[in-house]
Amino acid sequence: MTRKLQCGHTFHSNCLLTWLSTDGATNTCPICREKLDDIDIVVFKDRVEENLRRKYLDAMKTYDMEIAMLQETIEILYAER
């Protein structure tokens, strides 16, 4: 996922989030240092957080499904003994 800033520069979202989270970063473009809108930054960070939350939940669902399949396999193996 990429993000185009109002100054026209485009960055990978994770790179931009890292820049904006760095101590001393003043909500500016990493290249030209143009000041970014505070509202735009909040919306961007919220979107990134939501994407990360979704990925985490998807990973947990996959993990839960894999655990359930392993438990079924173990039950079948014990039943066959």
Image (cartoon, helix red, strand yellow):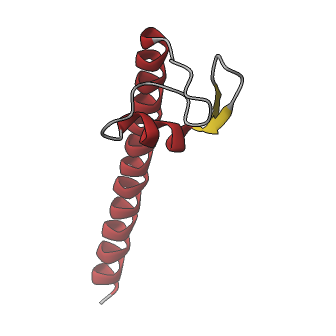
Q: Position of residue 61 (x, y in %)?
A: 39, 47
Residue 14 in the image: above or below residue 33: below
- Residue 49 sits in which quadrant? top left
x, y percentage for residue 4?
Answer: 67, 26
31 and 17: which one is in front? Answer: 31
Give the residue displayed 27% in from the left and 82% down from the top: 78
Percent of width and height locating residue 76: 35, 75
Q: Nearer the viewer, residue 56 or 65?
A: 56
Could you tell me which quadrant the N terminus lies in? top right
Q: Position of residue 75 (x, y in %)?
A: 29, 73
- Residue at position x 49%, y 14% from top? 40
Q: Quadrant of residue 38?
A: top left
| Residue sitting farthest toward the right | 8
Residue 53 sits in which quadrant?
Answer: top left
Q: Quadrant of the C terminus?
A: bottom left
Q: Is residue 29 visible?
A: yes
Residue extending furthest toward the bottom: 81
Depth check: 53 or 74 in front? 53
Residue at the spot x=68%, y=33% of the render?
10
**How many marks can you see?**
0
Q: Is residue 8 above or below residue 57?
A: above
Q: Is residue 1 visible?
A: no
Residue at 61% of width from left, 36% of height from top?
31
Horizontal side of 32 relative to 59 (left or right) equals: right
